[in-house]
Image: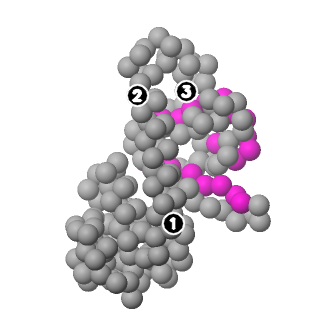
Amino acid sequence: MLYAQGEAATTIYVILTGQVSMGMLNSDGQEVLIDIVGTGVICGEGAAFDGMPHFSTACALEDSEVLAVPVHQLREMMLENKEFFSMVMSTIAMKQRMLATRLAQGAHPSADARITQLLAQISQAEGPTVKLTHQQIGNLIGASRVTVTRAVQRLRRCGSIYYERGQYKVIDPARANRRPST
């Protein structure tokens, strides 16, 4: 665990290798998966910058190498180096766009289209293939694991995605949007 929901923030984290999940407990104690991130992503910066407790929990999903940077050191680095400041701000802006996109995806009625959009978005950051479980995809798009399994089968049949052993590759996202979900 990198940090826990409700914990004071004194550090930001840079993921050097591996994957980290970020989730939060809602008011009834159920975990909501916010994102799964990998190499090159920073996390914990929101709470570090606003001084509020972490709103989520971050946990490594696999063996990962993570750089912990104390908040005061990060602020000094940002003041001393304009390029570094710009990179941090660009990263935060990218994360805001990603969260806004995920919010908009939730409004789309087709699980097929939501899955294709999610995989396309993640593959832009992570590379051509994406490794997720059906449960993780379901948590990220607000659908059940069974719904995801059925949608993945349809998407494979129509040639929108390639899937084998937990590895996904988006081939033609437009196919998922042209065909009716069944």
Question: Depth-wise, is mark 1 or mark 3 nearer the camera?
Answer: 1
What residue is shown with label 3? 69
Which quadrant does the C terminus fall into?
Answer: bottom left
At label 2, the amino acid type is Met
Q: 76 above or below 164?
A: above
At label 3, the amino acid type is Val
Q: Residue at x 43, y 14 (%)?
A: 81
Rendered location of residue 65, percent (x, y): 46, 39
What residue is shown with label 2? 87
Query: In the image, is 61 to the left or to the right of 86?
Result: right
At label 1, the amino acid type is Gly
Q: CA distance from mark 2 to mark 1?
A: 29 Å
Q: How many marks?
A: 3
- The part of the image, by quadrant, that contains residue 153 is bottom left
Rendered location of residue 18, percent (x, y): 43, 47
Q: CA distance from mark 1 to mark 3?
A: 34 Å
The magenta segment? 3-26
What residue is shown with label 1? 106
**Residue 61 visible (yes or no):** no
- Is disc 1 surrounded by few (<14), some (14 to 19) or many (20+) residues within 10 Å? some
Compare marks 1 and 3 and give the one earlier in the sequence: 3
93 part of magenta stretch: no
